[in-house]
Amino acid sequence: MTDRAPMARQQLEEWFLRRSPTTGARRVLPFSAAIASETGLVRKQNEDRAAIARGRDTEGRVFVVAAVADGIGGMQDGHVCASTGLASLLTSLLSQARAGVPSERWLESALIAANESVYRRYLSNGGTTLSVLLLLEGGGGYWASVGDSRIYAMESALVQLSKDDTIAGQLGKQRGVAEHSKLLQYIGIGSSLEVSVSAVTPGQQGMALLTTDGVHFMESATGILELIVRNAGDYGTCVRRLVELSRWCGGPDNATAIAIPFGNDALADETPMSSSCLEVWDAFGEVRILDFGGGPSSRHEPEYAEVLTNRDSEVPPGPPVSQADADAPSAPPSTGVKRKKKPKTKAAVKTTTKSKEENKVPQVQIQFSDKEG
């Protein structure tokens, strides 16, 4: 039996580590969701990583994952730890979905796999937070959080679902004392990791908001996050305002946010996609498909076309945008320095034929072979 998951994990990790603009905001059209990330004014690089992904299980049922990871400052290679943890989480989820594992077990196993991947590389000297929401076709889902990135629910009010893995968080107190804000556990800590998975309330509606601490540090200003979420008008405007407000407040840390509806009609659509594919969107506009071989296995198999040029220019930070700009859809970053072409491998990089509107949506599709040998 050939296990292609390690290859998928490595290539997805490399994609998360590509050069990107200092800020990015994207609407993910299939889910009416949005994702934004901002380096800030203090950090030299963005050590946050975030993604929205979509796949199918062996029965053809769609699942969607939203996840944010924040590489831990003061430890080794925070951006690598975040990329490794997130890539491992996503590939583990798809592997379990394809293997017929019950969905209630996916998150715990995926977080343990992410922890092991980072630990093997850094032996507790590097780590990342990881908060993840899993939504299932037919309703419901699960969420889990390790570290101090957060998951909120917005219905009649903004409510924090997750608990920070800090003394203050576990006691239900706000930050204030430095010692109380230190992480008790993180992805990469090793065998002492304890994962707690919670179910999404059946029939839950409204918005889920996932944030790194570069966004929710502003919560000390009474009700500011809820005011932004309540008055944003749409999810794209919401996440962009959140990361820009972090910048206006001094940009002390990397800021990342994902907004996605709990009740998502797009989970039941007829998107042409097989159970061997995982589509991945992040905040920076780039479209790729990683093809791991294996011919069409069902009517959901995507059509492949030409390779797209990488958009990997480094864009310097600019002044806060106007309200009109904040509310407008984000344009893809401009093409920057061209990289030398890499030789073709078995994992060929391909792209789907898309309409102009769809090409604005950042995505990656990872296709695993359906052959077991």
Image (tube, grey):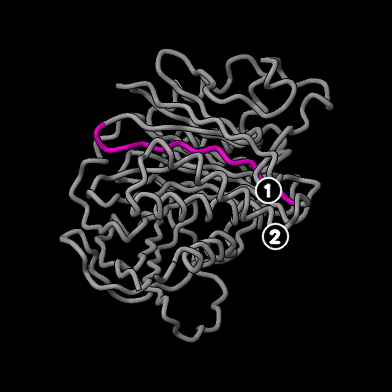
Image quadrant for the C terminus? bottom left
| Spatial CA span between label 2 and label 1 | 9 Å
Q: Circle 1 sits on which residue? A: 188
Residue type at mark 2: give it. Arg
Check the image and report above or below for 311 versus 23: below
Residue at coordinates 36% horizontally, 29% vertically from top-left?
262
Out of 32 and 163, give the one closest to the viewer: 163
Q: Position of residue 73 (x, y in %)?
A: 76, 45
Q: Position of residue 247 (x, y in %)?
A: 65, 38
Check the image and report above or below for 232 versus 333: above
Asked if residue 335 is among those painted magenta in the image, a careful observer would answer: no
Q: Which mark is residue 121?
A: 2
Snapshot quadrant of residue 66: top left
Residue at coordinates 32% horizontally, 76% vertically from top-left?
306
Asked if residue 133 is among those painted magenta in the image, a careful observer would answer: yes
Image quadrant for the N terminus? bottom left
Q: Check contact, mark 2 vs mark 1: CB within 8 A.
A: yes
Q: Position of residue 207 (x, y in %)?
A: 40, 27
Q: Which mark is residue 203?
A: none
Mark 2 and mark 1 lie on one chain; the one further toward the N terminus is 2
Check the image and report above or below for 346 versus 165: below
Residue type at mark 1: give it. Gly
* Circle 2 SS class: helix
Q: Which residues are magenta?
A: 126-138
Out of 361 and 101, give the one closest to the viewer: 101
Q: Residue furthest bottom?
A: 343
* Circle 1 SS class: loop
- Horizontal placement of 52 versus 70: left or right? left
Snapshot quadrant of residue 347: bottom left
Assess disc 1: are there few (<14), some (14-19) or many (≥20) residues with their C-alpha within 10 Å of its C-alpha.
many
